Amino acid sequence: MHVSELYLYPIKSMRGIPLDHGQLDERGFRFDRRWMLVDANGVFISQREEHRMALIDVALNAHVLTVQAPGMDLLRVPLEASGPPLRCRIWRDVVDAVLVSPEVHAWFSSFLGTDCRLVYMPNESRRIVDPAYVPEERIVGFADAFPLLIIGEGSLNELNARLQRNGDETVPMRRFRPNVVVAESQPYEEDTWQHIQIGDIDVDVVKPCARCAITTVDTETAEAGHEPLRTLSTYRKENSKVYFGQNAVHRQLGTIRVGDAVHVVSRKA
């Protein structure tokens, strides 16, 4: 098995950036989900509420993020914000963040048609990964819960085969927003992994990823449907949740590259 695709998502719930290599810092890939939209109460906003976030492209260079969306001027976001602090909420976590700028807030509010603000997670902010799954204290950015999400190509191929048999359109991997995609894996083989090596990086596979309605949002049109969640629920549902992919935590800093070999060190009992 080997890494076939890598993705970085600088702004939570917006389009990802394909990578040929990803540099790991404490939180996951560098710059991954260090920015997030929040509402007037400081609560995070995602494609669950605002489907049009699926149309927003983000690019990264040495100095700024550039953000584009249909009908909007190009937006430039500094890589470090210097605005006032804001306590914001993502799921059950309350996190120290920094507001970016009124001009940036206005751009996103105009495109989405709702009052929102962009926040940045500074290096001093420490959001702790759930110790029930990772006993050693680890931190994460604005990802839902863990630094990395891994999906095997075999799993998507099996899902798409089911969709085709039902007369439905297939879905691309980007619907599931992985960081690492593994080629030459058996369908749902990643469910069995406990400790793997990706190139030189040791990775602990800690928790199945429960999927939500974001997977039903077409990334080209921002229209929501029923698939693939409806089909997944027929065979990947457990205790009222639908699972696809595995959350993971890296043990050391370093680089993951497309083409890196993936070795299974141990499997779950």
Image (cartoon, rainbow, N blue to C red):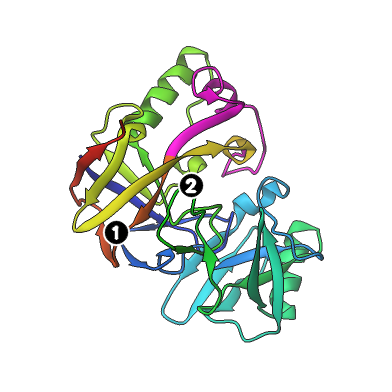
- Residue 162 visible in image: yes
Please state if 81 lies on the left or on the right of 44 as rendered.
left
Badge 2 amino acid: Arg
Residue at figure coordinates x 66%, y 48% from the top left: 47
Residue 139, image x, y percentages: 47, 64
Q: Quadrant of residue 207?
A: top left
Question: CA separation, marks 1 and 2?
Answer: 16 Å
Residue 101 magenta: no
Q: Is residue 220 above or below residue 267?
A: below
Q: Find residue 43 and name its label.
A: none
Location of mark 2 (residue): 177
Tell me the chief SS of the magenta region.
Answer: loop
Q: Secondary structure at mark 2?
A: loop
Residue at figure coordinates x 18%, y 48% from the top left: 261
Residue 249, image x, y percentages: 38, 54
Q: Are marks 1 and 2 in contact (CB under 8 Å)?
A: no
Location of mark 1 (residue): 20
Magenta stretch? 217-245
Badge 1 amino acid: Asp
- Residue 172 visible in image: no
Residue at figure coordinates x 62%, y 86% from the top left: 82
Query: Image quadrant for the N terminus?
Result: top left
